[in-house]
Every structure is written in C-alpha cells, then in structure tokens.
Amino acid sequence: MIGIIGRKLGMTQIFNESGEQVPCTVIAAEPNPVLAVTDKAAAGFASVQLGFEQQRTTREDKSGRTPRGRRATRAEIGHAKKAGLDYAPRVLRSFRLDEPGNAKIEIPTYNVGDSVKVDVFAAGEMVKVVGTTKGRGFQGVVKRHGFGGGPNTHGNTRHRKPGSVGPGTDPSRVIKGKKMPGHYGAERHTQIGLRVEKIDAERNLIYVRGSVAGPKNGIVLVEKQA
C-alpha cells in the first residue's frame, strides 16, 4: 500500500459517464519526494517517509541576524540533504507499504530520492483519507455531543445545560468519560471507503467522492485501501 500527502482545496461536482452528478473533494498533491525507506527484513515492516512542500530557511546575510518567522532547523535540512534535496519539507509523514496479517500482498519498491505522484491512484480505487477536523474551540454539550437540551417553556431556564452530572450520595463523584463541555474539534480523523472519481496528473489533483475532514488548505493523507 502507498499514499500521498496533499492539501484539501475544497469541494466541487463532476458528472460521471452515466450523467450522474457526483460531489467531490479536490486534493492538490504535488510530487512527494522519498526521504527514507524502512526495510521489512530489518524493522519488521516496510514503509517510506514522504515530504510535502518547502520550509523557509535562514538567509545568509552579512548582519548574521535570523529573519522572523518559522525556519527549518539544521537537523531538518541535514535530513533532507541525505535524500538529495536542497530544501527541508514542510510536512513529513510515513506510509506503510505492507499490510499487517497479509503476507501475500506485493510490496512496492521505492528508493531514497524517488517521487510519489498522484498517478499511483486510478479512478475507481478505494482510499482512506486522514485529516484534522476543524477546530471549534470550547463548546457546550448541545453542540459538542448533540444533547437535546431542556424545554423552552413552562418556566424552564436551563435550555442548553447538561443537567445532573452525578448523584451526591452514590457514587459522590463524576464518572470518568462523562460527556461535558470542552474543547471541540482539531482532532485527527480517518475516513475510509472513499472512491477516487478522477485523477488530473497534469495539475496534480485528486478528486475523491464525498467530503473529507478538515478546513480548506488543510493537510490530508490519501492512502490506498485494501
């Protein structure tokens, strides 16, 4: 199995051969360079480390000052140079090539310095997409957990409150895992069973049926699904 790192551009619609309107998420995935390869014989599993986009580096000016903003560290630059890159990727992710429990699967071969492009996918294939959900800050139980809330009439003043969170006598505490207000969103989310509707190799675009987690321009991982 193999995957690619990309950015979610947004949603659109396309029409298939049957004339059906299909909602799709468009993912831009520039060629991902291979920075490291893990051998199954040595580590027990086979995987590749891919990079995506570029980080800014410190400018060589006479003043010796470091420009403001996030810059790649010397360790990141050195790691990239081993793969023959003259820049440090902004995102590094590993993709497992073999499938646990299935020894019959054919493991693709990659070497350091190779590139993974969108043409590793084909229309009609099933993929899983990993993204980070939109962060919504601190929210109450109605929005965070879907509580129904209290009545809006008959003198009730607790419309969106959680209600009782635990008896005082027994158990005299709040049970672990109780659904309560708190931070909502900004979590890793994996969605499986998505169909690739179209591949635009010239523009490095992947059209995936349906919606995927995350805001526009969010980083997503698209991986082949057995």
Image (tube, rainbow, N blue to C red):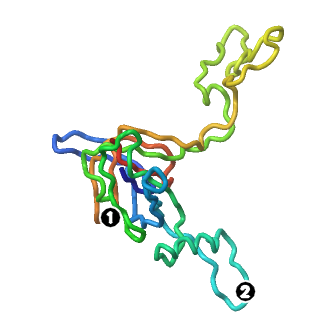
Whether residue 9 can be seen here: no
Nearest to the eye among marks 1 and 2: give it.
2
Q: Quadrant of the C terminus?
A: top left
Q: Residue furthest left?
A: 18
Q: Residue furthest bottom?
A: 62
Query: Residue shown at 42%/45% (left/top)?
Result: 129
The foreground one among 188 and 81 is 81
The residue wearing badge 1 is 203
In the displayed structure, 203 sits above or below 128; it is below
Indicate the secondary structure of the residue bearing disc 2: loop
Indicate the secondary structure of the residue bearing disc 1: loop
Q: CA distance from mark 1 to mark 2?
A: 40 Å
Q: Amino acid at mark 1?
A: Arg
The foreground one among 127 and 159 is 127
Q: Contact (CB < 8 A) between labels 1 and 2?
A: no
Mark 1 vs 2, N-terminal side: 2
Query: Residue shown at 28%/45% (left/top)?
Result: 125
Query: Residue shown at 56%/44% (left/top)?
Result: 134
Q: Position of residue 143 (x, y in %)?
A: 61, 29
All told, the count of numbered labels is 2
Q: Position of residue 86 (x, y in %)?
A: 50, 78
Q: Amino acid at mark 2?
A: Gly
Query: Residue shown at 34%/43% (left/top)?
Result: 103
Q: Residues within 10 Å of mark 2 (few under 14, many from 20)?
A: few
Give the number of the disc on residue 64. Answer: 2
